[in-house]
């Protein structure tokens, strides 16, 4: 049975894909939770996951030589990690996560990472609604580990999709691009605490705020339509046809904005990987706005 493929896929699509017994399809549980939730995504995966899925550990597939959480690894690091999950360059990868409230919360980070390391965009999909929607629509789950045959993977880093601290700092004066922050408005405005105790809220000068959850439908656990997304970008003063950069706390929810831009036909958007957490700890005081005094 042939199964059509797109970026956001439904429970029905994934059920059909599993039923087709495609020889080169891998399912990844990319669940990740904020440090203040007390949840352990890896433990939860071991207890319950979609049959055939493997766990993609965002903290493990990362640069271990920096104190900033889950920064992108080297080409070799990414290639070795995904190869160990049975993925090669021709594998179609379907990613999901397990968030009780949002249609997607961390799966989009892994979708972006695959694009960052050269995987064909037509071979990486996100299960819209994640594990909760899978369960609500009768999907089976298991606690059994999947059999994995390691594969060889060739990663080709695409530098245009990511920005670093120096490039964001330079842009404050050059204004070559707009920076869009995906955190909740309270964290952006400095009125709501950050989820990490060593980081205060605030924002980068000249940045705009589009909370990631404003791009999602809570009721049916979907992403808003391209027409609705375009209206949100327009209201925030973002020209969706132009290049821009997105940020957040540590590069996770920023990828929701990148995904929304992709759904609107703009694949040029970059992610500031270090995001506000790196900025808060590196930038001088005058380049950190809305930070509470106490």
Image (spheres, rainbow, N blue to C red):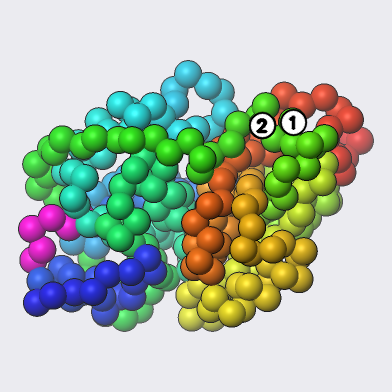
Label 1 secondary element: helix
User: Would you call the spot at circle 2 few (<14 residues within 10 Å), some (14-19), or many (20 or more)?
Assistant: few
Q: Nearer the viewer, residue 76 or 81?
A: 76
Q: Nearer the viewer, residue 280 or 257?
A: 257
From the viewer's perspective, is 247 left or right of 189?
A: left
From the viewer's perspective, is 105 left or right of 169?
A: left
The residue under the point 15% across, 68% down is: 18
Image spot of residue 272 (x, y percent): 60, 40
Image spot of residue 143 (x, y percent): 20, 55
Name the residue tied to disc 2: 167
User: Would you call the spot at circle 1 few (<14 residues within 10 Å), some (14-19), or many (20 or more)?
Assistant: few
The residue under the point 23% across, 74% down is: 4
Q: Nearer the viewer, residue 244 or 59?
A: 244
Name the residue tied to disc 1: 170
From the viewer's perspective, is 252 left or right of 23?
A: right
The residue under the point 18% across, 70% down is: 17
Q: Quadrant of the N terminus?
A: bottom left
Question: Gap in Å between the C-alphas at discs 2 and 1?
Answer: 5 Å
| Residues in magenta, as a range | 21-26
Q: Quadrant of residue 228?
A: bottom right
Image spot of residue 223 (x, y percent): 51, 72
Label 2 secondary element: helix
The residue under the point 26% across, 39% down is: 82
Query: Can I make out residue 234 in this image?
Result: yes
Q: Is residue 23 magenta?
A: yes
The reply to whether dot 2 and dot 1 touch (C-beta < 8 Å) is: yes
Identify the residue at the far top of this view.
Answer: 65
Query: Can I make out residue 197 in this image?
Result: no
Q: Quadrant of residue 153?
A: top left
Our reading of the magenta stretch's main secondary structure is: loop
């Amino acid at each position: 049975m042939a199964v059509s493929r797109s970026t956001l896929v439904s429970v029905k699509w994934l059920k059909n894909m599993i039923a087709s017994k495609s020889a080169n399809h891998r399912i990844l549980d990319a669940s990740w939770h904020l440090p203040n939730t007390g949840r352990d995504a890896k433990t939860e995966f071991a207890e319950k996951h979609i049959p055939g899925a493997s766990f993609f550990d965002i903290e493990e597939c990362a640069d271990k030589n920096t104190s900033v959480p889950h920064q992108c690894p080297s080409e070799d690091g990414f290639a070795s990690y995904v190869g160990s999950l049975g993925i090669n360059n021709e594998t179609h990868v379907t990613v999901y996560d397990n968030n009780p409230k949002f249609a997607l919360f961390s799966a989009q980070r892994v979708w972006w990472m695959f694009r960052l390391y050269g995987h064909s965009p037509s071979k990486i999909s996100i299960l819209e609604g994640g594990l909760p929607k899978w369960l609500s629509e009768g999907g089976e789950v298991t606690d059994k580990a999947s059999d994995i045959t390691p594969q060889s993977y060739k990663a080709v880093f695409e530098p245009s999709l990511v920005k670093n601290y120096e490039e964001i700092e330079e842009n404050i004066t050059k204004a070559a691009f707009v920076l869009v922050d995906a955190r909740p408005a309270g964290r952006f405005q400095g009125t709501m605490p950050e989820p990490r105790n060593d980081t205060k809220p605030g924002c980068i000068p000249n940045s705009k705020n589009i909370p990631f959850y404003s791009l999602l439908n809570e009721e049916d656990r979907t992403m808003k339509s391209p027409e609705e997304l375009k209206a949100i970008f327009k209201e925030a003063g973002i020209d969706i046809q132009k290049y821009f950069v997105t940020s957040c706390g540590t590069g996770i929810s920023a990828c929701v904005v990148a995904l929304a831009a992709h759904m609107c036909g703009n694949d040029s958007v970059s992610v500031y990987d270090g995001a506000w957490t790196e900025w808060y700890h590196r930038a001088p005081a005058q380049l950190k706005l809305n930070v509470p005094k106490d």
